[in-house]
Amino acid sequence: MTLAALFTTGIELNGAQRLLLMLPLCLSIAVVYKTIRLDHLNELPKAAAALWGTIVAGMCAVGLGLWLLFQVMV
Amino acid sequence: MAETEHHSYLRAPVAGLLAWLVPGLGHIYLGDRSRGLVLLVAITATFWTGVAIGSVQATVAPHSRKLWFAAQLGSGGNAIAAYSLHRLVSPETATSPKQPVTANWLSAEVGVHYTGVAGLLNLLLVIDAIVRAERPTVSLRGRAWAKGVT
């Protein structure tokens, strides 16, 4: 497989894998945001992990809330 | 004196342009090498992971995903390179609104999200690089070389 083929052939995903792939995306957002905000980069791993956990927990809470609302309404 | 003022005047636009072209390069230009390298790796890895998941034909498609492509353009050089690759491997889908079938729709959506978010995050870096260029002592506190810049 050439390097170009890696980017021209998509990966087959199912629904669960699609949701799991949100985790690294959230990590990327947390790392970039904290890299900009922090004065000292040696605090980055801890701060980014904390923000990542917050984002993931927040998304889970929103998802659970919407799922409960759906159960009540339907 | 005049040379110093000229240098300061160009500092912010050059930092912004470099940050747009290559994520993190604006920060490296401003002397914040480690911050720039972290940003370079994070943004570039996010963008190309998205392309690898969804395929370049399905993710970087300016005619079928106009708004997402606008977001992807935020990552500058990465988006230009990806679109060039798309044109190279599939010129007919690169210039038409027809959706290419190179991945299932879930993969294409995830790929578009990754690349779009990478582009929007890079716009944040461009703004940050410009702000840091105008106020070098805020981000480069204690660096001896920064004293001579302003």
Image: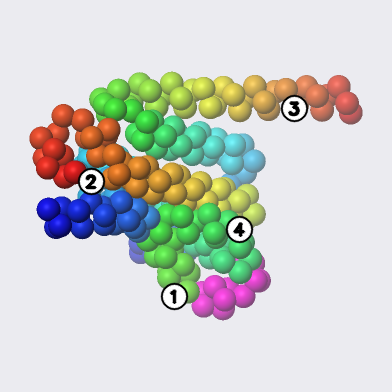
**Residue at mark 1 to residue at mark 4: CA–CA distance:** 22 Å
The numbered mark at residue B67 is 4
Residue A43's place in the image compared with B117, above or below, is above
Amino acid type at circle 3 is Leu
Write down the quadrant of residue A41 in the picture.
top left
Horizontal side, residue B33 vs residue B26: left or right = left
Residue plotted at (41% across, 24% down): A49
Residue pointed to by mark 3: A66
Residue pointed to by mark 2: B30
Residue pointed to by mark 1: B88
**Residue at mark 2 to residue at mark 1: CA–CA distance:** 35 Å
Amino acid type at circle 2 is Leu
**Residue at mark 3 to residue at mark 4: CA–CA distance:** 27 Å
Instruction: Give the magenta part as a residue range.
Output: B88-103
Residue plotted at (15% across, 53% down): B4
Residue plotted at (61% across, 61% down): B65
Q: Picture coordinates of residue A50 (x, y %)?
A: 43, 21
Residue furthest to the right: A74
Residue closer to the observer: A20 or A40: A40
Q: Earlier in the sequence, mark 2 or mark 4?
A: 2
Q: Earlier in the sequence, mark 1 or mark 4?
A: 4
